Image: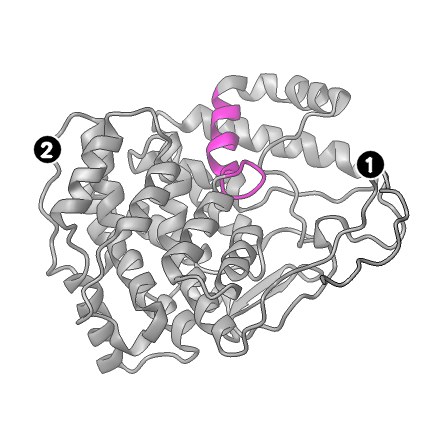
Amino acid sequence: MTVAKGLAKGLEGIEVDETAISLVDGLHGTLSYRGVPLDSLVAWPFTRVAFLVLDGNEPTNAALRDFEDELAAACTLTAEERGLLDLLAATTAHPMQVLIAWTMICTHDPAHFRRYGDAARGMTIAARMPTALAYLLARRRDREPGPVDGRESNPVTRFLSAIEAPVDPALRQAFEITQILQVEHGFNAGTFAARVVASTLAPVENAIAGALATLHGPLHGGADQAALETALAVGSPEAAAAFVDDCLATGKKVMGMGHREYKVLDPRARWVKKFATELAPGTPLATTAATLVAIEEHFTARMREKHKPLHANLEFYKGIVYGLTGLPTDFFTASFAMARVYGYVAHFIESRRDNRIIRPSARYTGRRPPDVGPCAESP
């Protein structure tokens, strides 16, 4: 693709604003939230990471308990929300589309999350999204949704219990760490979309809905579903090389390979690959995991021949972790959203501190109108 001189197609390399929330260092392959490196964050509980991203500082034990208590108090769906989810569960709407619709009607109790100001309703959405997804999944499986355990302080654990995920400590820890890896990631497409919406002074639920609509795309968060479904379609490690060669010959994208920001290995991919290769053997996804490894190995080898160091990104192996919990592939991206929503709210809060509407210019290339001179003033 040829890009006209002076244009930054896709805003690549363009700094459009400042942020203190996360640092994506693509040159060195590192990621940190609020100055805390990823390899430290993965040892924290999910709620401590979420608090850090939202607040900017690590919580005291008392502040963390209050935060967890408020998330638990706000996690129950209203009758109106359950009614909407019942209706949408009976359709063919993708779970991401369901989430977008639910986000716009999620009922906020003004008693909750007062310290977040204009973002309070966004925190209700964050608290309730795992419940909404578990409810939708139960309905899609023609099951009665189970009760929400408000006594459980960790929303990740509440979600895994609600979807009846295997009670395997290693798998549950892998899922929680995978969620931590996804809370925040700079000005990615979904987060930037949220900031564009927020810049118009639209309410926080609109910003979250815009971000979710963007996250759904297969070139963004939707790559997790696409990557696993690709491996299932390829079928075996032995077929991986021919698949990759065909993609390269025909210009098809290998979903989950490469990343706009990272010039070296995506640090999040290192963790999810470890989980996938350790947890998959002996499970129904063992061959699928081995197929993903074979696809990655052949793809990276072919890219080295072209002097293009491309590697697997977070989405490539993540589907194995999600799949082992029992989640269907079409629920992968929505489960990603349960973590990233905290980042969206943090960016909403940050953007409102020094708001300016985001309104870039475009270079017009269409047919020119007749030169009629400047507009005359109205009489």
Question: Is 220 inside the magenta-drawn segment?
Answer: yes
Q: Position of residue 238 (x, y in %)?
A: 59, 18
Question: Is 319 inside the magenta-drawn segment?
Answer: no
Residue bearing the label numbered 2: 144
Q: CA distance from mark 2 to mark 1?
A: 51 Å
Q: Amino acid at mark 1?
A: Met
Residue at position x 70%, y 37% from top? 300
Q: Which residues are magenta?
A: 217-232
Q: Secondary structure at mark 1?
A: loop
Residue at position x 46%, y 26% from top? 288
Q: Chief secondary structure of the magenta span?
A: helix
Q: Amino acid at mark 2?
A: Glu
| 249 to 363, vertically: above or below | above
Q: Secondary structure at mark 2?
A: loop
| Residue positioned most to the front | 379
Residue bearing the label numbered 1: 1
